[in-house]
Image (cartoon, coloured by chain):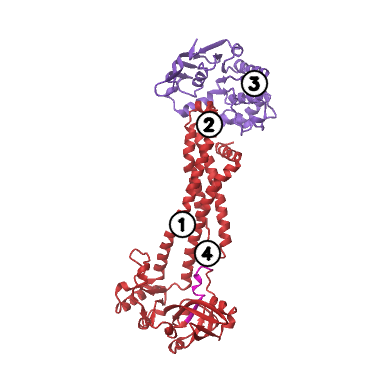
Chain colours: A purple, B red
């Protein structure tokens, strides 16, 4: 489903100095997989996640997503792929503070160009109930706990029925109990709905919940 | 929630988050729009007022003036209007002989000191013919107008404009049959005119004048000349014929460039074109403040984009296209600008309503539409640069921004 072939990512620091964030990455992720990308901070794991999440382009190499060569797609097409196929869960939750919980969850459906087969509001309310957020629909993100905010972010990532969830340090800002709940939800989604789940983490305990682990150090898979 | 209502709702909620900032930014547009609407209202009001003044004097009037008043380009050449010839009684008699002419009204003009009832006023003195009242629609309220006999006998009688009579006598009734001293010569007031109106705009030239038989006025006008003559044709169709005949008659005595014969419509057109230029100038001055307001919007939108880089990144990550981000910020700047525009329109409307009793300003649907369209346009024009900056951020850089 996602194939990264010979990926390099370099940043120009000034005229001559070039920082290489990723070196010759080859990676194939099958549909329905549960895997983690693990590495210390600065290892390039976030850069890799941004490439898989179609938020960035590699300096060299090719990315194929659902059989499509990303380098040949327009920015609008790539935005639509993110919208329809990928759900993001971030360490800082990344909710929009002046939108309510319900509006945050519905935001991807506003931007979609796809004709939805379901009523987005009904689906959002179902997910809210399932995630134990009932009664918080009209609350604003800064008025609920961190664990609740991360569940709102999860709900937002699910509203478009994605094929892939990319979770970047999803437990990083949570206490142990809330963190465990979030990981449990991610595993459930992978088991029950066959959604591909990629967890990016520096924490070996988190990585250990997945069978496949990709270790990355200094921009290289080891 | 449809896309449009969503975009508008986000724009409103973002603007409400920073109420003071929103208010101050709109203030720039408010000042710009209200000054444009006000200046436009003043200009158009003045133009309309002058047109009405002319039309109230009758529409079949032809003006005979010294100098080449209506220049080649249709503009009014003020220098030459002071040159040229001055007319005299012979011209007056010649013009009266034209068959299609109803009235000929010569004018000699002088500023005089009038004393009566213990009061003193300075005003214009018009030495003119008995036709002035019928020909220029000046109605006598009290007493009588002077007649041809008064002119020929050089009777020492005057008719006063409404306002002058009021200033001198407090009550115009008291003026009748009283003595008035004009430049230390004594005359009898035989009539007072109805108010011609025109607010405090110098449009009271008819109300604030002394009317005297032109022969009687020779004492103040030793050259016995006339500054201008107004000729009234018997109907609208004969206006061009009369005009030609006047020119023919005058060419026997004067050079072509020494006098002008103008129809009311030509005169109105000239005035109209002068006012159009004036209006354009006024609106141009107002537009400068609009421009400054627009720059204020651009400035604050750049700030807004920088403050919300992270939010832009989040929206891009969940599937917003560049166009979505562009629309969001454009909607915000248009709402901001429209808000200022509508408030500015309201302020201008109130000011115009307040000063209308004293000044012929007016506001119409056109200036309202212009205000709304221009402020939307300013929102788009000055919003598009910051909005493009927002749209062109790299999603990854934006979402990592702290």
Q: Mark 1 Cα within 10 Å, few/some/many (few <14, many 20+)?
A: some
Residue reaching furthest to the bottom: B153
Q: Mark 4 Cα within 10 Å, few/some/many (few <14, many 20+)?
A: many
The secondary element bearing badge 4 is classed as loop
The span from disc 4 to disc 1 (Cα, nearest Å) is 16 Å
Quarter of the image with the N terminus of chain B in it: top right
In the image, residue B263 above or below residue A22: below
In the image, residue B361 above or below residue A127: below
Q: Name the residue beneath numbered marker 3.
A: A174
The span from disc 1 to disc 2 (Cα, nearest Å) is 41 Å
Provide residue A184's location: percent of width, then percent of height: 64, 16
Q: Nearer the viewer, mark 4 or mark 3?
A: 3
Q: Chain of mark 1?
A: B
The secondary element bearing badge 1 is classed as helix
**Contact (CB < 8 A) between labels 2 and 3?**
no
Q: Nearer the viewer, residue A193 or B339?
A: B339
Mark linked to residue B119: none
The span from disc 4 to disc 3 (Cα, nearest Å) is 70 Å
- Give the mark nearest the N terminus, 2 or 4: 2
Give the magenta-colored segment's residue range.
Answer: B200-211
- Give the mark nearest the N terminus, 4 or 1: 1
The span from disc 2 to disc 3 (Cα, nearest Å) is 24 Å
Q: Chain of mark 2?
A: B
Can residue B283 be spotted in the picture? yes
The span from disc 2 to disc 4 (Cα, nearest Å) is 51 Å
- Give the mark nearest the N terminus, 1 or 2: 1
Q: Name the residue beneath numbered marker 1.
A: B282
Q: Name the residue beneath numbered marker 4.
A: B360
Q: Name the residue beneath numbered marker 2.
A: B309
């Amino acid at each position: 489903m996602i194939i990264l072939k010979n990926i390099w990512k370099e940043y120009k620091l000034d005229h001559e100095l070039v920082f290489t964030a990723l070196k010759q990455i080859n990676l194939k992720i099958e549909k329905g997989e549960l895997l983690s990308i693990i590495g210390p901070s600065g290892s390039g794991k976030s850069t890799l996640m941004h490439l898989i999440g179609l938020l960035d382009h590699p300096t060299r190499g090719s990315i194929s997503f659902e059989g499509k060569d990303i380098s040949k797609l327009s920015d609008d097409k790539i935005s639509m792929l993110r919208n329809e196929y990928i759900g993001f869960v971030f360490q800082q939750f990344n909710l929009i503070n002046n939108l309510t919980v319900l509006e945050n969850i519905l935001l991807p459906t506003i931007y979609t160009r796809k004709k939805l087969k379901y009523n987005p509001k009904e689906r959002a309310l179902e997910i809210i109930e399932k995630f134990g957020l009932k009664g918080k629909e009209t609350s604003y993100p800064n008025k609920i706990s961190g664990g609740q905010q991360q569940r709102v972010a999860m709900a937002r990532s699910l509203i478009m029925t994605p094929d892939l969830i990319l979770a970047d340090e999803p437990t990083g800002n949570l206490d142990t109990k809330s963190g465990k709940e979030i990981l449990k939800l991610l595993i459930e989604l992978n088991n029950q709905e066959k959604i591909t789940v990629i967890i990016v983490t520096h924490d070996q305990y988190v990585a250990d919940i997945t069978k496949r682990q990709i270790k990355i150090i200094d921009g290289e898979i080891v | 929630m449809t896309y449009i209502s969503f975009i508008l709702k986000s724009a409103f909620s973002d603007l409400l988050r920073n109420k003071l900032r929103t208010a101050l930014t709109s203030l720039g547009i408010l000042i710009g729009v209200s000054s444009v609407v006000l200046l436009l209202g003043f200009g158009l009001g003045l133009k309309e007022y002058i047109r009405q003044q002319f039309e109230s004097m009758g529409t079949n009037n032809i003006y005979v003036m010294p100098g080449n008043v209506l220049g080649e380009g249709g503009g009014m050449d003020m220098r030459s209007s002071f040159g040229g010839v001055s007319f005299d009684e012979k011209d007056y008699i010649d013009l009266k002989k034209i068959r299609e002419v109803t009235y000929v009204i010569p004018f000699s003009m002088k500023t005089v000191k009038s004393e009566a009832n213990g009061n003193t006023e300075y005003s214009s003195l018009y030495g003119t013919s008995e036709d002035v009242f019928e020909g220029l629609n000046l109605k006598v309220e009290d007493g009588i107008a002077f007649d041809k006999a008064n002119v020929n006998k050089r009777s020492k009688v005057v008719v006063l404009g409404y306002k002058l009579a009021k200033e001198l006598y407090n009550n115009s009734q008291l003026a009748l049959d009283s003595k008035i001293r004009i430049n230390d010569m004594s005359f009898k007031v035989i009539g007072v005119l109805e108010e011609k109106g025109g607010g405090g705009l110098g449009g009271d030239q008819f109300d604030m004048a002394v009317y005297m038989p032109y022969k009687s006025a020779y004492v103040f006008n030793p050259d016995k000349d006339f500054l201008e003559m107004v000729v009234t044709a018997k109907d609208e169709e004969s206006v061009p014929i009369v005009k030609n005949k006047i020119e023919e008659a005058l060419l026997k005595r004067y050079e072509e460039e020494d006098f002008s014969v103008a129809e009311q419509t030509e005169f109105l057109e000239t005035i109209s074109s002068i006012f159009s230029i004036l209006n354009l100038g006024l609106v141009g001055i107002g537009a400068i403040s609009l421009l400054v307001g627009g720059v204020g919007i651009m400035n604050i939108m750049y700030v807004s984009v920088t403050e919300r880089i992270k939010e832009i990144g989040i929206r891009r990550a969940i599937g917003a296209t560049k166009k979505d981000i562009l629309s969001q910020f454009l909607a915000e700047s248009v709402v901001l600008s429209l808000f200022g525009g509508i408030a500015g329109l309201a302020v201008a409307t109130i000011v115009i309503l307040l000063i209308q009793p004293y000044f012929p300003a007016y506001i119409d649907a056109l200036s309202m539409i212009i205000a709304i369209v221009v402020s939307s346009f300013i929102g788009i024009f000055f919003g598009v640069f910051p909005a493009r900056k927002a749209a062109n951020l790299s999603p990854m850089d934006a979402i990592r921004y702290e």
